[in-house]
Image (cartoon, rainbow, N blue to C red):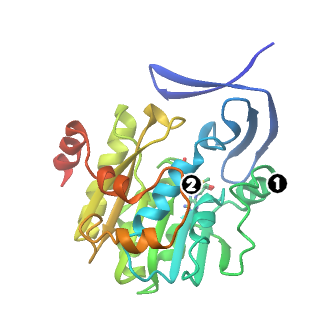
Amino acid sequence: MELWFTEPHCEGAKFSIKVERQLYSGRSEFQRIDVFESREFGRILTLDGLVMLTERDEFIYHEMITHVPMAVHPNVKKVLVIGGGDGGTVRELTRYPAVERIDMVEIDELVVEVCRKYLPRTAGCFDDPRVRLCFEDGLKFVSGKSEEYDLIIVDSTDPVGPGEGLFTREFYGNCCKALREDGIMVNQHESPYYDEDRRNMQRAHRRIVESFPISRVYQAHIPTYPSGHWLFGFASRKYHPVKDLRAEEWNRMGLKTRYYNTRLHAGAFALPTYVEEYLREVE
Ligand code: SAM
C-alpha cells in the first residue's frame, strides 16, 4: 500500500509527496499540525494541510529570509522574528556572533513543541541564550513598539487563519515603527504564479510600499511550495538591498551556506517580466 500527502496548490493542480508514515497529528487552538516522514524530502511539517517545511529544502527558505538582510545591514544587534515556530530562521540568525538578542513571537506554542521533538535540525537553536520566545499574536506584539529592532523577519503562514493579521496595513505600519531608523523588514511574500497566491502577493506588496520608502521583492526556488517559485519582501527606510550589499564583509565571515551567496543575492532581485508587471500594477 502506498501513502501520499497531497496539497492542492490551486483549484486545478495538486502536489503530492509519497510518505512512509505519519509521526504526529494534533490540533491546537489555532490550527491542525502534522509531521510526516518521507524518503524524498525527509520529515515534513504541515499546518492545516499546507507544507511549511521539509527537511530537504528548508535551507533555501531559511537562508534567503535571513542572510539577504544580514548581508545588507552593517550592525544587526536586536532581531524580531514573527511566526517562525519551526526554528529555521532562528537557527540561521544564531550563526551571527554579533547578534545580541533574538525575540521570536509565535502565536502557537504547540508548533514549537512539536518541532523541538520531531524536527531538531530546524528547531535546535531555541536554547541559545540570546533567544527569547514569546507566545502571542505577532500583530499585538509589535503594536506600540518604537525604534527597538534592527531587523524584523516576518516568517508567517499564508494570509488565512492566524496569519491573516500579518498581511495587514496596520501590521506593516507597526513593524516600520518598531524598527530603528536604519532597520530592515523582510517577509515571506507568497508566490506570483497561481492566481490566489498572486493576489495575496500583490496585496502584501501594495501595503508594504505604502509603509516603507524602499520596498523590493526577491525570489528563490523552493520545490515544495506552490509552483516552486517563491518571493520575499525587503523593506527599509534607509538601505537598498542591492546597492547597499556588503558582499566583501559578509564573505569575510566565512559562513557556510548551501543556497545563499552574495552573487545570487544581487541576482535574486532581478525578477521575471511578468512578476515585475504584477508588482508595478500595485506600486
Ligand atoms: N516557512 C513557512 C511558510 O512560508 O510556509 C512559514 C513557517 S512558520 C511554521 C509559520 C508560523 O507562523 C506558524 O508556526 C504559525 O503558527 C505562525 N503564525 C501564524 N500567524 C501568526 C501570528 N498572527 N502571530 C505569530 N505567529 C503566527
Of residue 268 and residue 48, the one placed in the foreground of this image is 268
**Can residue 70 be seen in this snapshot?**
no
Relative to 80, residue 187 above or below: above
| Among the two numbered marks 1 and 2 on one chain, the one whose residue lies closer to the N terminus | 1
Closer-to-camera residue (100/32):
100
Q: Which residue is mark 1?
A: 117
The residue that label 2 is drawn on is: 162
Q: Which mark is residue 275?
A: none
Q: In the rendered view, does 247 fall on the left or right side of 155?
A: left
Dividing the picture into quadrants, the one containing residue 90 is bottom right
Callout 2: helix, strand or loop? helix
Res. 67 in view:
yes
Residue 68: x and y in percent read 41, 62
Q: Is mark 2 within 8 Å of ligand 1?
A: yes
* Whether residue 161 is situated above or below residue 51 in the rendered picture: below
| In the displayed structure image, the side of residue 188 where residue 135 appears, left or right | right
Quarter of the image with the C terminus in it:
bottom left
The answer for how far apart the CA atoms under marks 1 and 2 are is 23 Å
Disc 1 versus disc 2: nearer the observer: 1
Residue type, label 1:
Lys
Q: Residue at x 66, y 73 (%)?
A: 134
Q: Amino acid at mark 2?
A: Pro
- Secondary structure state at the residue bearing disc 1: helix
